[in-house]
Image (tube, rainbow, N blue to C red):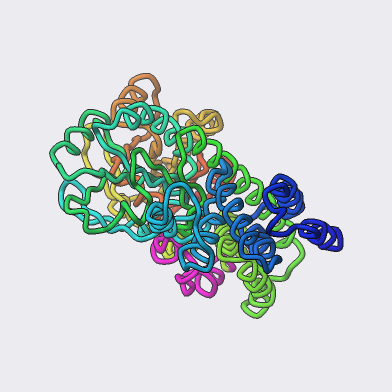
Amino acid sequence: MIRKKLLILFLFIGVSLSAYSQQREKLEKYIEEYLSMTPPVTDSLITACDYLIGFSEDTLIKTHIAGYLFDRFYSSKVMGMKSVAIHIAKNYFINKKLEWKGDDGMLLLRLFVEFNEHSLIGMDAPELNLEDTSGNRHSLRGQNSKYTVVYFFDTDCSLCKKELPGLKETIKKYEGEDVGVYAVYTQSDVNRLKQFIQQEFPGKNDNWTFTIDPDFSSGFHKLYNVLKTPQIFLLDNNKKIIGRNLDHNTLSQLLESATKNDRQLSQNINAFLNDYLKVVDISDTSAMRAAIEPLFRKSTEGGPDLYRMMFLRLFDILQLSDDTTYQKCALFVAENYITNRSDLWWDNSVPGEYIPKMAERIKRNMAGAIVNDFTFYTKKMKPVRLHEIDSKYTILYFYSPKCAVCKPFGMDLKSMYKSLKKRGAEVIAVDVESDLYTFKKELKNTKAPWQRYYIKDEDRLDLFYKFRKEEVPMIYLLDNAKRIIAKKINTKTINTLVK
């Protein structure tokens, strides 16, 4: 701080109106030295600029410093620096506190501010609620993706045509990171947009949402500085702007940095939670509250992002455990810290749909519970309901042909099948991965003494919410009332439990 003050003092000593022109280079040199000692973040730079402009009482010097600083940040290639330029323009020139002496005139300065001030780095993205080609409206802020790319384009724009292949490749590269695209066609011809989508996106593209504003009533041009195309913005899960004026290369770099940070934080959270759960008592409701409440308090103090990552991972660790105490704690966490905290989630389907369904799965998958009913299909697509299978015991066996552990498990089960059958056990083997063609091919190539079943594509999500089939082989042993005797067991345990 002392060094800064000395610089400022030296900056203005002996500088007067008569000597101003000879001192200009020296003045700008000291401005740069001062800025070099300022943290390169928007708020700090704005404070530094205000300090520099306000130090002198001389209007001519103030005007020159403000103009120099505006030009410096206006022309900067560093993302986020436009915010500093806009601050200077609004607080010193547009309000006529100082006289604007720029070459472009006051009108262009006003246009620069008006077309940029709504979509700066760190701001909440202005809402757009535009129609798709079928007339259905899509809210930008309602997009349920962790990262949202806002892409303004024109089908006749040569730069857009050049940029699109790289953009598509970038989105595909990060499709596992929950990246969605909100694409805005900047012209009014909906038929041209339909033709473009058919040509460029002939298949299913769930992560691309194409919209149009034919009467331009949303004001997207001014909200997002769409004076030319393409324009690309990147939003985080809170729909804050974390990147603007991007191309596919800078978008890829920004996504790589953001997702890398997310992965590292996720790893740290996972390691912390596993260690934490080893040393805390969660044996009853009171103990659970004493263990979980500090986590909630600390994580929400760190911001909603930390809370969401912390509690989603906590719930998954607990509910995927084979320990009944952990599973009961998962239900406690779901009820007291997630489903009733929807205001802390950017994707309301997590507390409103995913967690309640997973909580119900925990309850219905515990020993002693009657297992969820489900309809499986034979190779001829004949439906078979689980609850209609009449047997003393049902061995519900979820498997995958690609699973290395399933093969030896299946061989062991096959070796004892006749004995199990005599004791009243029926094996229901369910392929959880194959499509119908692969399923039928697998049936021809491999033999098994029991019936094997197929899952329709449209039923796979429902299966996930009803059975714990992520880790194959997964075995449920059921009694004649379809009550769970045990699950996730080996062939030795099956042989012991089937009397």
Residue 257 in which image quadrant: top right
Q: Nearer the viewer, residue 450 or 398?
A: 398
* 463 on left or right of 83: left
Q: Nearer the viewer, residue 327 or 274?
A: 274
Q: Residue furthest bottom?
A: 286
* 309 on left or right of 464: right
Q: Which stretch did the figure color magenta?
A: 329-354
Q: Is residue 154 magenta?
A: no
Q: Residue at x 35, y 45 (%)?
A: 460
Q: Residue furthest top?
A: 445
Residue 388 in percent (x, y) is at: 28, 53
Residue 270 in percent (x, y) is at: 66, 53
Q: Residue at x 66, y 64 (%)?
A: 47
Residue 375 in percent (x, y) is at: 28, 48
Is residue 18 among what the camera can see? yes
Dominant SS in magenta = helix
**Is residue 158 placed above or below 374 in the rendered structure?**
above
Q: Residue at x 66, y 46 (%)?
A: 264
Q: Nearer the viewer, residue 304 or 74?
A: 74
Q: Split into 4 quadrants, where in the image is the N terminus?
A: bottom right
Residue 405 in which image quadrant: top right
* 489 on left or right of 15: left
Q: Nearer the viewer, residue 481 or 155?
A: 155
**Is residue 188 placed above or below 340 in the rendered structure?**
above
Q: Is residue 347 magenta?
A: yes
Q: Residue at x 27, y 55 (%)?
A: 138
Is residue 469 among what the camera can see? no
* 21 on left or right of 405: right
